[in-house]
Amino acid sequence: MACLASRIPCGKRLTKERLDRIERAEDSIQKILDSNVVVRVRDHDRIARIECSDISLIFRNRDKIIEKLKDLGFDYVTVDLEGYRGVV
């Protein structure tokens, strides 16, 4: 797994709480999707930006994902339409 700090934009404060929230968000989405797709949650303060190698799975499970990420403290949940662009 790539370094969780890479999910936080440059110049933003890096805290253990923020890293834990990202890890819990990604783990939760993986459990909801029950698939081996690549999922990354980018933390933009109150906004969670989801990148996924199969975006259709995100949309099919949107209500569960939104509920979980809001429970983790995000006010807004977005999906990056370009999907996951990292090296797998």
Image: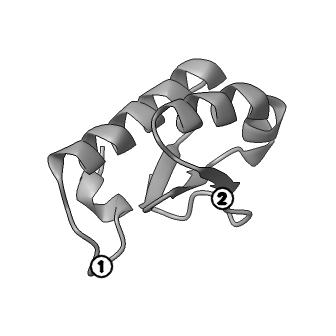
What amino acid is found at the position of numbered circle 2 in the picture? Gly
- Looking at the image, residue 58 sits to the left or right of residue 12; the answer is right
Residue shown at 30%/63% (left/top)? 6
Residue that protrudes farthest toward the bottom in the picture? 11
The amino acid on which the numbered mark 1 sits, given as a three-letter code, is: Cys
Instruction: Say how many tags the image has.
Output: 2
Q: Is residue 20 left or right of residue 79?
A: left
Residue 26 circle label: none
User: Which numbered tag is attached to residue 10?
Assistant: 1
**Residue 34 visible from this viewpoint:** no
Give the mark, 1 or 2, whose residue is nearer the N terminus.
1
Examine the image and state in which quarter residue 31 appears.
top right
Residue 33: tell me if it is visible: yes
Q: Secondary structure at mark 2?
A: loop
Q: Judge left or right: residue 28 versus residue 52.
A: left
Give the residue at x 30% y 43%: 1
Separation of disc 1 and disc 2 at Cα? 20 Å
User: Of circles 1 and 2, which is in front?
Assistant: 1
Can you give x and y, in whole percent of width and height, for residue 62 in the image?
76, 35
Image coloring type: one colour
Up-down: is 10 above or below 88? below
Instruction: Specify the label residue 83 is tagged with.
Output: 2
At 72% from the left and 39% from the top, the residue drawn is: 58
Within-10-Å neighbours for mark 2: few <14, some 14–19, many 20+: some
